Amino acid sequence: MNEIPSGMHELDTDAARDHMSNPDWAVRIVAVPPGEAPLWVRQKWVGLDLPVMRYAAHRKLLAFGVSSIPHSWPAQWAAILRGRAERVAGYVVAAVPAVGILAKASPEAAAWWRENTPHLIAPQRYLVFHEEVCRIADI
């Protein structure tokens, strides 16, 4: 799992600012997502249904690891220009509601996110779950 800044650097769409969402569309996490969070934290996502922010599947995005993301916009753009952002095909979910859903299943894992990545658990912040660990789930 990766994090993308609120600007969402999309590679495969002309609608980079298209904030359409469908509240009845979600992905179920079916395998442990890759990422920088500890394995035990990432394991707690498995089985959860997370609402997707954008209903066009298989977006390709430039993303950063949740621990290694630069904290300022200039630093993020510099990292992108230097090739330090990862190209990820996946599903975008809003960080705050995702961690809220995680908290119901595993308060300890949600606490890890809130304590170790507080800059990511905020409005207009997003997580990307790689497409290979997701399945479409109607909620």
Image (tube, rainbow, N blue to C red):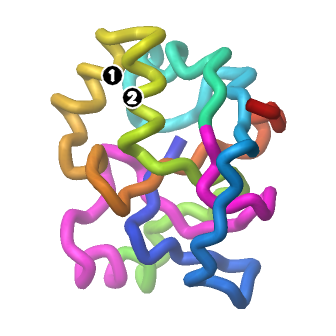
The answer to which of marks 2 and 1 sits earlier in the sequence is 2
Q: Is the C-beta separation of discs 2 and 1 under 8 Å?
A: yes
Where's the C terminus, which quadrant? top right
Q: Give the amino acid type for the residue marked by disc 2 in the picture.
A: Gly
Question: Looking at the picture, how far across and down is residue 95, in whole percent?
Answer: 41, 45
Up the image or down, 107 lies above or below 24; here it is above
User: Residue extending furthest bottom?
Assistant: 14
| Residue 134 % position (x, y) | 75, 35
Asked if residue 57 is among those painted magenta in the image, a careful observer would answer yes
* Relative side of 111 to 14, left or right: left
Picture disc at residue 110: 1
* Residue drawn at (62%, 21%) of the image: 48
Report if residue 30 is visible in the image.
yes
Q: Residue 115 appears in which quarter of the rendering?
A: top left
**In the drawing, does residue 41 fall left or right of residue 132?**
left
Q: What span is colored magenta in the figure?
A: 51-78
Label at residue 100: 2
